[in-house]
Image (cartoon, coloured by chain):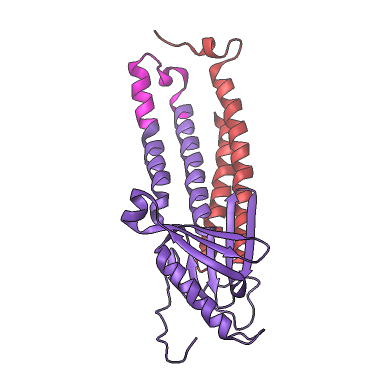
Amino acid sequence: MVVDGAAIFPGLGLAIAVKAILILLLVFNLVFSLIIFRQIQLMGKRLPTPLEPFLRFIATIYIGVAAAVLLLVIGVF
Amino acid sequence: MDENTVKPKRSRNPFAMFALAPLGVSFDEQDEGEDIVLLLRAHIVTLVPAFLEFIVFSILPFVVIPVGSLIGFNISGFFGATQLWILIICWYVFLAGFVFFRFIFWYFNVYLLTNERIIDFDFRGILHKETSYANLTQIQDVSPRIIGFFGTFFHYGNVYIQTAGEKPEFEFMNVARPDDVARTILGEVRDEETEAPGEIR
């Protein structure tokens, strides 16, 4: 049996439904990445370690990637 | 500490799970003359389930697409090549976030023993963080416990510390060499008991 996209989301194109879900998840992911960054900042103040600046750098990169992928999905998907 | 005591080698490893007098580590409420004697994190073996999840989730897109085609759910029939690539990119972005969070969770869940107190930095979730302190003079009982196959094999377990402080029990969970941890804590408690009140040695 071949599954049809229209059967999964009747009245709505599969690609549009997937895009909406994806945007929602990516917005959550962006918020999650900002919270992670803030947590690293706060923990770095409480317990400074040699690795903390590097972790903050990785978290910054991750925020950038999360935002870029969100824009990519909004614009291209 | 006694002058004749041989000072242990200081740990330089930033990923250490059992670090004696770690270099470059301090904490915000550290008093003058207060030194970190021991820094503990959960044993690295406790990250194995997360690592296995990472392996499974990394290969999942390359399994789901061919298997979907075999059972009649042709994903590439629903999406164009660009959309499919974007879906895969999104998957790996979520996965990277998950891996990073698990690492941060492990890295910042730290137990400290100083020459004055024990400190438990609890990073329980993304929005839940807790720090508990107990002075060494408040410690009443320390009991290490190694349970299970992995604990015995890799030599890690829990250390339960009964205190007379606000928090009656501290639990150092899944720490390496729990018996050495207990011995070190008791050694510091003994040293603290010989000091005059308010003195920091």
Chain colored purple? B
Q: Would you say the magenta stretch is mainly helix, strand or loop?
A: helix
Task: List x then y, in percent, for residue A22.
Answer: 57, 30
Q: Specify the farthest residue to the bottom.
A: B3
Looking at the image, residue B5 sits to the left or right of residue A32; the answer is left
Quadrant housing residue A10: top right
Q: Nearer the viewer, residue B4 or B121?
A: B4
Residue A53, percent across and down?
54, 64
Which residue is at 52% across, 45% downward? B97
Image spot of residue A62 (x, y percent): 54, 49
Camera-nearest residue between B139 and B122: B139
On the question of residue B23 being in view, the answer is no
Q: Is residue B16 magenta?
A: no
* Residue found 35% across the figure and 29% down from its top: B63
Relative to the observer, which residue lies in front, B57 or B123? Answer: B123
Note whether B24 is above or below B17 in the view shown: below
Residue at the image position 62 percent from the left and 38 percent from the top: A28
Instruction: Tell me where the magenta segment starts and ends, as one range.
Output: B61-82
- Residue B191: x and y in percent read 53, 82
Looking at the image, the residue that sits furthest to the front is B140
Q: Is residue B130 visible?
A: yes
- Placement of B162 over or under B97, stated as above or below: below
The chain assigned the colour red in the figure is: A
Left or right for B172, reference B32: left
Q: How many marks on residues?
A: 0
Quarter that holds the C terminus of chain B: bottom right
- Residue at 68% over, 63% down: B166
Q: Residue furthest top?
A: A1
The answer to which quarter of the image holds residue B120 is bottom right
Residue B165 in the figure: left or right of residue B73: right
In-image side of B77 versus A11 (left or right): left
Which of the two residues, B158 or B87, is positioned nearer the viewer here?
Answer: B158
